[in-house]
Amino acid sequence: MPLRTVPAKACQFAAELQVRVNSDDSKTAPITLVARSGEAVCHWYWGNVVHDLGGMTLAKPRIPLDYCHDDDEVIGYANKFDTSTGELVATGALIPYSPDPEDKATEIIYKAQQGVPYEASIFFDGPLVVEEVSENATTFVNGEQMSG
């Protein structure tokens, strides 16, 4: 299979984020991130794409969550990953660094308490294997038959 260079932004996918707020004096806020659906989605670069969740491996058991994909702005972590529902669901926590309103985790927790909805995005980084399914072919991914 020939290798090709893919723009980094092509490995970014939208994700659903829920921030659950504990009591006002809690130090953390639990999060649930529906990182990927097991179904095909229409993507600006790939067209219709589905991720094979059965082939997923983690580089480490705890993954940092950063604000706007900025490695210098870590706001928490994800430490549990479940694919049993056919989706990739990650759970973890937002961890404020300080009560300073400039702290992004503090800001997100506060605004979530006030009803502001948040979204997330994830990067799938390599090594990746991309399998193209031709227009008239079918394949099974995540237990479902998909058409090319």
Image (tube, rainbow, N blue to C red):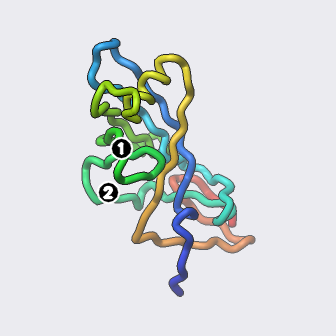
Q: Amino acid at mark 2?
A: Leu
Q: In what element is the residue under mark 2?
A: loop
- Pointer 1 residue: 81
| Within-10-Å neighbours for mark 2: few <14, some 14–19, many 20+ | few
Check disc 2 and report the residue beneath it.
58
Residue at (57, 64) in percent of width and height? 10
The residue closer to the viewer here, 64 or 100, is 100
**Looking at the picture, which amino acid does disc 1 mark?**
Phe
Name the residue: 45% across, 70% down: 128
Q: Residue at x 46, y 60 (%)?
A: 124
Residue nearer the viewer, 87 or 24: 24
Q: Nearer the viewer, residue 4 or 148?
A: 4
Residue furthest to the right in view is 136
Q: Position of residue 145 (x, y in %)?
A: 61, 57
Count of numbered tags: 2
The residue at the point 56 percent across, 62 percent down is 9
User: Which quadrant of the figure contains the C terminus?
Assistant: bottom right
8 sits left or right of 92 in the view: right
Q: Is residue 91 positioned above or below 106 on the image?
A: below
Q: Are marks 1 and 2 in contact (CB under 8 Å)?
A: yes
Q: Quadrant of residue 147?
A: bottom right
**How many neighbours does mark 1 have within 10 angstroms: few (below 14), some (14-19), or many (20 or more)?**
some
Secondary structure at badge 1 equals strand
Q: CA separation, marks 1 and 2? A: 9 Å
Residue 52 % position (x, y): 49, 59
